[in-house]
Image: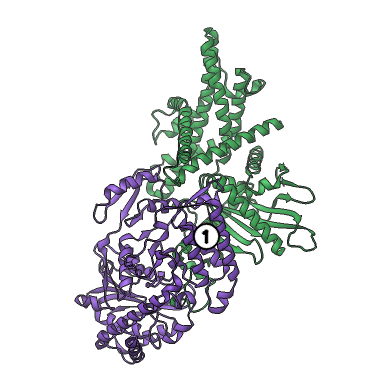
Chain colours: A purple, B green
Amino acid sequence: MASSSTLKNESSSSTEEMNLSTLARATSLSTGLALRTLHRSITCKPISCSSTLYSLTSINPKTPLFLRSPDFTATLSDFQKWQNWAKTLALSVNSSFKDSDNGPDSEILLRELSWLIEDALENPQSLSTGSQVEVLRLRADLGDLYTLWKQRIEIRRPFQYIVGCEHWRDLVLSVEEGVLIPRPETELIIDLVCDVINQNVDLKGGLWVDLGTGSAAIAIGIGRILGDTGRVIATDLSPIAVQVAEFNVKRGVYLGENRRPWAVQLIRAVSGDSVTCEHDAVVEPAKISGEGDNSKDGSKDDELKVSCLYPTFQLKYFDKDKIAVKQGSWFDPLTEFQGQVAGIVSNPPYIPSGHINGLQAEVGRHEPILALDGGENGMSELLHLCNGAAFMLKPGGFFAFETNGEDQCRFLVDHMESVYRNSFYDLRIVPDFAGIRRFVTGNRT
Amino acid sequence: MSSMLGRAYRRSCSVLSRYQSISTLFQPPSDPQSTDKQQVHVSGFQFLSKNAHGFSSVSNKRLNFSCGSSLINTRVSFSTLAAVEPSTSDGLTVDAIVAKQWAILDESEGDWKSHASAIAQSIRLIKKRLQWEKLKVRLEMLSIQMEKPDLWDDPVLAGKISREHGSLMGKMKQVNGLEQELIDHIDMIKLAHEEDDPDLESESVKALLRMRQSVKEKELEALLAGEHDSCSCYIEVQAGAGGTESMDWAGMVMQMYKMWAQRHGYGVTIVDEMCGEIAGIKRATLRVDGEYAYGYAKAEVGAHRLVRISPFDSAKRRHTSFAAVAVTPILGDGSHHVQINESDLRIERYRSGGAGGQHANVTDSAVRITHIPTGITAACQNERSQHQNKASAMAVLQSRLDQREMARQAQINAHYTQSLTDNSWGNQIRSYVLHPYRMVKDLRTNFEVSDPDSVLEGEIDDFILSFLTNSMDKENEA
């Protein structure tokens, strides 16, 4: 812990001037932070985990709840007992979290509860249709469901860690402690990139990098819209993030524009490989899993055709080679691509250190500080990324960074206009859907 | 008369349950091993194959009319269709059978004349419901357009025309097939009688009886012949004035539709819901996915009135509250009436306080979209990602804009103004009385039920079908 305190001093001074020579220093800084995070998580562990399922020491990323096999059973009445208990607990919160730190109120918690049920039950419709099933098949033990919901309310463990996934755009990504839960605001980065590559074929087929990828949300989102030759390299300093990112690249789930229950059912039937659903269709699940087994040994971009009652349904495996995950700080793993990168995107830590203590409990107590703390004014990493962008992007290359809001956006644009005069053009500040100026984008001259 | 209505309703329920068995096919079975689920599948298929069998005789007959018809000479074959009215060897036509007014006896009475008369009546009703004369004129018009050599210069319009032509042609052939089938059966019976072949005669009478039963179902199908009837739809419920009591009522109405839709095996999703502070909902939008969801649900448009002792009134007084219901069809891709321009949209995240971004862990990513030129908005907060909320809200917005455009066009074509979809949002259609007596009564048809509980649990088919029958038949008389 001694090392981390010295690092903290360093981090407060690191905003003074950022140029290319600080690249190396920033690396060691981030490593220190990573250690700090690990220490933190480990000290937290006894409080948060009574179930071994969720222990933080395990190396393999966990399969999200909704993809686990339904190996557990509960009687309808036992399940409803749990449901009523969970409901009462959610209602008891009222607006107390909201009042204290802008956390969720009862209405939101009740919706989360219905999603937890959706993920935990093998056949969620069986509850609503009133069919008289006596025994329900579950993807987690009922006792674990008690523990999980207790964690949600009593220690404010984020819902996404409870169910082990976050729905982000049309993806379902695995997340767990140690990895930042991708935010809804960040979804817009994909739209920004989409607009850019639709106007520029060269960028569409180029190399894109997602720095500090976390769950690989942005990397996968971009990977899906790039052209045939386009590819993405995602980097992250945290070993947990790298593992989760790799898991998502290999086994992430794409729901498609028109999410329908049977599409999810279908994905469950072939879970084990990432699949994309090209059409909505009605399929007999038995048939899919049968054929799915046969073609699992197939390499990238396999197509799995499934006979069905509707138009031909195709399952496409992700082209896994399109997205690579590398461990390392920011640009460190990318030195060989200097001046060749078509696009740089990042949602780096940008919360000023002084704000960390007052964060919403779900964030401050459970999410990795490495992914949140942006130094004294929150700009340390962002400035570093701007400097790197000047250095890594090829002419015409595009960048998009998420920020804490208007002040950081303005600061960055000023910085780029003054320090890198004529190096960038088309610098823009883009608001999120809540109207907060959230992103800075631009192109390399 | 009342017994006939009763029969029609029983029949209608069987039609509905049939739709249900089809739509269960669309839901993946929860457990592939589960045997009773598989039985549902099997029975569904059985129905399909039974139906296919029933049709096979029809399609054989159809060959007589349609062989050799191609795009170019459709009009020729169409004219032949209309010109040659099927008649028996001794010149009896379907209209002539109706005119003879043979007594219609119970199905169990083996009298062929009674069967034939019932079938002829049904065919006449089907024709009336399909607006036969208008349909013929429209088909003629479409056929002329189909012949134009420059038709495919505008592929979108051409596709529309050829789709409509195909669909009308199908209806016409089906009815003509029914007429021919009836005539053939009668010929066969007469022949058997002349040849003194009792086996053949009883066999033919049985066939006629089977036809009598199947044609009754087609009467109901003809009710749902509207352009968008087969679409999925949104049902929107909004609480009237009156605070908690009316919000609670709106919540009960929403629940009624949810259970109705689930009972029919439709997919049910709450897209947008704004809860009341104490109970119920201020408004909610329900997406109902499945065949003919719109065709049925459109009968529910209007204001629904509740009379009861309010559980929210400490003085235990009787309250009257209203909930308004709107229904919009979800048109398939390519058949939208309005092209939405991205730049006309304002997309907002709502209920998001604070700094957002990394500061907040949220599972709520509610999105509201405003179409600036019209001021029409749509919101969604029940999806698990902002992107999906946006997509859902866009779909709602699209269907609202489509409906607005359709209403506008309908106003231009004045003849359409009496149609079902024009029932205004504020028009009171049904009264639910829980106190001092118990009754649900439809103010449009006077159809009533003395068990409000079952209605509120989603048993509204009888109301829907009585309204559809009533208004459809009234409309055609006008």
* Closer to us: A32 or A21: A32
| Residue A295: x %, y % from top left | 27, 49
Camera sees residue A51:
yes
**Chain letter of disc 1?**
A
Q: Residue at x 61, y 32 (%)?
A: B125
Residue that carries the numbered disc 1 in the rendered image: A114
> In the image, A177: left or right of A323?
right
* Closer to us: B32 or B418: B32
* Closer to us: A180 or B88: A180
At mark 1, the secondary structure is helix
Three-letter amino acid code of the residue under disc 1: Ser
Which quadrant, please, contains the N terminus of chain B?
Answer: top right
Callout 1 environment at 10 Å: few (<14), some (14 to 19), or many (20+)? Answer: some
Residue found farthest to the left = A336
| Residue B355: x %, y % from top left | 48, 79
| Residue A53: x %, y % from top left | 40, 64
Image: A64 above or below A3: above
Q: Residue at x 51, y 39 (%)?
A: B21
